[in-house]
Amino acid sequence: QVQVVESGGGLVQAGGSLKLSCAVSGRTGSTAAMGWFRQAPGKAREFVAVIRMSEGTTYYVDFAKGRFTISRDNIKNTMYLQMNSLKPEDTAVYYCAATREWSRVYYPHTPDQYDYWGQGTQVTVSS
């Protein structure tokens, strides 16, 4: 089993920055990739970014390109999402997820590609 726990959410003004963290524990050696999703009220959960733990290969959704950066620290078993130039439409619960197989990670990056999920952390961007 793998456990993932997010942290770092909060309230920020538009144009500000936040850095989310995702700590992984348990059978971390079985984690091939980790991703971030988000879900706003009344909307479906949507993909934000993913990183391959071994090589650091990354993919981003269009709205995240140039503003968000995903990274990982394999020594600390932690993944990060640096979010800059935040907008009110970025307001959502952000979820960390882990998958055992990199081959399952491909466009359109859906939640069913992931095996383990955190409880989510709220990000609120005020205008």
Image (tube, rainbow, N blue to C red):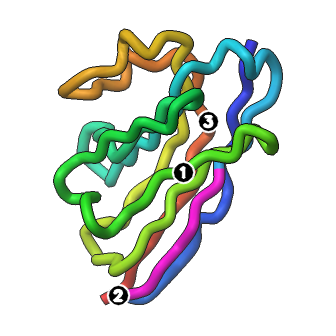
In front: mark 1 or mark 2?
A: 1
Q: Residue 103 or 121: which is nearer the viewer? A: 103
As measured in the structure, the alpha-carbon distance from the residue carrying label 3 to the one carrying label 2 is: 27 Å
Mark 3 vs mark 2: which is more N-terminal?
A: 2
Of mark 3 and mark 1, the one earlier in the sequence is 1
Of residues 116 and 93, which is closer to you in this image?
116
Q: Is residue 40 above or below residue 109?
A: below
Tell me if mark 3 has few (under 14), some (14-19) or many (20+) residues whose alpha carbon lies within 10 angstroms of its own.
Answer: some
SS state under label 1: strand
Frontmost of labels 3 and 1 is 1
Closer to the camera: disc 3 or disc 2? 2
* Mark 3 and mark 1: Cα distance apart in space: 17 Å
Three-letter amino acid code at the position of disc 2: Gly
Q: Which amino acid, by three-letter code, is at mark 3?
A: Gly
In the rendered structure, find residue 15 and report the number of the disc placed on it.
2
Residue 63 place in picture, x, y as percent = 20, 58
Q: Secondary structure at mark 2?
A: loop
Quarter of the figure with the C terminus:
bottom left
**Rendering coords of residue 68 (x, y %):** 38, 63
Residue 71, labelled with which disc? 1
Does residue 63 appear left or right of residue 4 in this picture? left
Identify the residue at horizontal 78%, vertical 16% (top origin).
27
Left/right placement of residue 23 relative to residue 82 reads: right
Classify 10 Å Cα crowding around label 2: few (below 14), some (14-19), many (20 and above). Answer: some
According to the image, label 3 marks what residue? Answer: 118
Based on the displayed image, in which of its 4 quarters is residue 20 positioned?
A: bottom right
